[in-house]
Image (tube, rainbow, N blue to C red):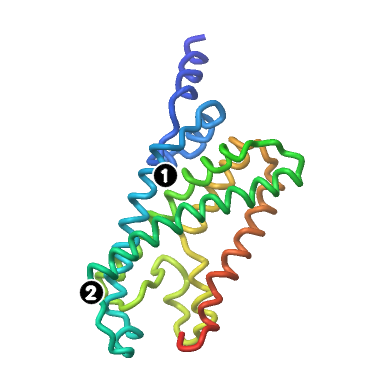
């Protein structure tokens, strides 16, 4: 009886962003009954701001900017990167949650949009932290543009298209999809087979969009 009470008390606790790193199953079990968004979203925006700021600083030394011979104030560049990162982060959460809501409806699952949004916000802490770690590595090696050192990209440098595609096979990105899948299965009640199908579709879409830059002139 005491064990059952302890388990119930554990589940009634609020899920945490940090818990997604070490105990995602527990966090999503909690999310079945309690899925706060406000404070976690604020923390995610702070992480987005940090990522954007570091990325903007790295961009100050980009080869493309030097070739154009245009002087842009550092404060403007970094500030724009911070705001852009935060804005794109929120839009990304909203659109991804909408994508999954539509998919859920097609699969006969009635999970509310708000819960799907919460699942995505919490799971995304993995990918954002991974992005920050990669930016710090880029700073350490003096890179002039952000490269994913935790992906296969550093192994494929001769072909721009393959290099862009290889960046999608990143440890943190794969970890994010695993955690997201756990959330969709536990908190949203989607079957494991359907979770795999959804994640594969999203991965292909995201990989395709993020790889388009390799086909742009001058890239």
The kind of secondary structure element at disc 2 is loop
**Location of residue 66 (image quadrant):** bottom left
Q: Residues within 10 Å of mark 1 (few under 14, many from 20)?
A: some
- Which residue occupies the foreground of this view, 158 or 142? 142
Separation of disc 2 and disc 1 at Cα? 37 Å
Label count reads 2
Residue 66, compared with residue 95, is above or below; it is below
Marks 2 and 1 close (CB-CB < 8 Å): no
Q: Is residue 101 left or right of residue 125?
A: right
Q: Which residue in the structure is indicated by mark 2? A: 73
In the image, residue 172 sits, relative to residue 39, either above or below, namely: below
- Eye-nearest disc, 2 or 1: 2
Q: In the rendered image of this protein, does residue 139 appear above or below residue 87? A: below
In the rendering, at what x and y percent does residue 205 appear?
A: 62, 64
Where's residue 7, x and y in %?
Answer: 49, 20
* Horizontal and vertical percent position of residue 197: 69, 54
Residue at 63 percent across and 40 percent down: it is: 185
Q: Position of residue 216 (x, y in %)?
A: 52, 84
The residue that label 1 is drawn on is: 21
Mark 1 secondary-structure assignment: helix
Residue at 37 percent of width and 49 percent of height: 45
Q: Is residue 195 left or right of residue 84?
A: right
Residue located 47% across and 50% down the image: 124
Q: Residues within 10 Å of mark 2 (few under 14, many from 20)?
A: few
* Relative to 120, 45 lies left or right: left
Q: Residue at x 37, y 43 (%)?
A: 42
């Amino acid at each position: 009886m005491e064990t059952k009470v302890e388990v119930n008390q554990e589940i009634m606790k609020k899920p945490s962003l940090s818990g997604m790193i070490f105990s995602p199953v527990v966090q999503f079990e909690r999310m079945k009954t309690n899925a706060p968004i406000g404070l976690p979203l604020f923390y995610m925006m702070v992480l987005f701001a940090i990522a954007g700021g570091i990325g903007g600083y790295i961009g100050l030394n980009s080869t493309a900017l030097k070739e154009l011979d245009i002087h842009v104030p550092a404060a403007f560049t970094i500030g724009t990167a911070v705001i852009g990162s935060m804005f794109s982060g929120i839009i990304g959460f909203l659109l991804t949650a909408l994508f999954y809501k539509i998919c859920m409806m097609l699969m006969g699952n009635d999970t509310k949009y708000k819960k799907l949004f919460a699942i995505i916000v919490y799971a995304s802490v993995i990918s954002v932290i991974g992005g920050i770690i990669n930016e710090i590595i880029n700073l350490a090696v003096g890179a002039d543009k952000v490269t994913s050192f935790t992906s296969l990209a550093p192994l494929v440098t001769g072909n721009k298209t393959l290099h862009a595609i290889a960046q999608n096979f990143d440890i943190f990105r794969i970890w994010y999809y695993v955690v997201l899948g756990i959330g969709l299965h536990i908190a949203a009640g989607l079957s494991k087979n359907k979770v795999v199908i959804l994640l594969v579709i999203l991965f292909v879409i995201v990989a395709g969009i993020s790889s388009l830059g390799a086909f742009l002139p001058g890239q």
